[in-house]
Image (spheres, grey):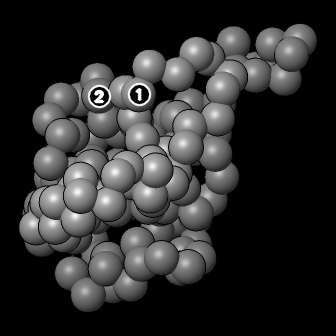
């Protein structure tokens, strides 16, 4: 794990946190280790930040470029942000069926994915690739 914000030049490898702490004098190391043990971080939840139509569309478009598993996780995050019960009702799926369809490792049918996308007020768009193989 790298330590962000340590002033490293672009391309240089960051030292793992335990290596940095290990390099401290013993008198300082114990205090730093104790302080880190007391820190608690809330888990990151993308659905907390999906608060506009434009952001949601960009988020899902980027996720779709990364493959099925990433897209399905992103679709689940958007459904959570909008409210799973409301999305289930709008898509015509049962709430439990929606959770199963969006669960990690699930491979729902295209019509299920399309129903969820429509329930979110979105649509799929197919665009030509540029010469470098990326969407234009």
Residue 41, position as x, y percentages in the image: 17, 60
SS of the residue under disc 1: loop
Asked whether, in this view, residue 123 is left or right of residue 128, the answer is left
Q: Can residue 127 be seen in the rendering of this structure?
A: no
Instruction: Nearest to the eye among marks 1 and 2: give it.
Output: 1
In depth, the one of 95 and 17 nearer the eye is: 17
Residue 117, position as x, y percentages in the image: 38, 51
Residue 123, position as x, y percentages in the image: 43, 38
Asked whether, in this view, residue 67 is left or right of residue 27, the answer is right
SS of the residue under disc 2: helix
Residue at figure coordinates x 35%, y 52% from the top left? 25
Residue 64, position as x, y percentages in the image: 57, 44
Residue at figure coordinates x 75%, y 22% from the top left? 134
Q: Which residue is mark 1?
A: 6
Q: Is residue 130 above or below residue 102?
A: above
Q: Which residue is mark 2?
A: 55
Asked whether, in this view, residue 29 is left or right of residue 8, the answer is left
Near mark 2 (Cα within 10 A), the count class, few <14, some 14-19 or many ≥20, is few
Q: Give the mark nearest the N terminus, 1 or 2.
A: 1
How far apart marks 1 and 2 lie (CA) works out to: 30 Å
Near mark 1 (Cα within 10 A), the count class, few <14, some 14-19 or many ≥20, is few
The disc at residue 67 is none
Q: Quadrant of residue 51?
A: top left
Q: Quadrant of residue 107?
A: bottom right
Q: Is residue 24 above or below residue 112?
A: above
Q: Quadrant of residue 70?
A: bottom right
Residue at figure coordinates x 89%, y 12% from the top left? 131
């Amino acid at each position: 794990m790298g330590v962000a914000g340590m002033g490293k030049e672009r391309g240089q490898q960051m030292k793992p946190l335990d290596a940095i702490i290990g390099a401290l004098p013993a008198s300082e190391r114990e205090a730093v280790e104790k302080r880190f043990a007391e820190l608690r971080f809330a888990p990151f939840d993308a659905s907390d930040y999906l608060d506009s139509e434009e952001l949601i569309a960009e988020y899902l478009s980027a996720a779709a470029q990364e493959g099925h598993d990433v897209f399905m996780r992103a679709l689940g995050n958007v459904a959570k942000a909008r409210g799973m019960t409301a999305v289930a009702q709008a898509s015509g799926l049962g709430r439990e069926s929606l959770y199963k369809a969006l669960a990690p490792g699930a491979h729902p049918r295209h019509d299920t994915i399309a129903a969820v996308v429509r329930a979110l007020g979105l649509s799929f768009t197919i665009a030509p690739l540029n010469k470098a193989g990326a969407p234009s």
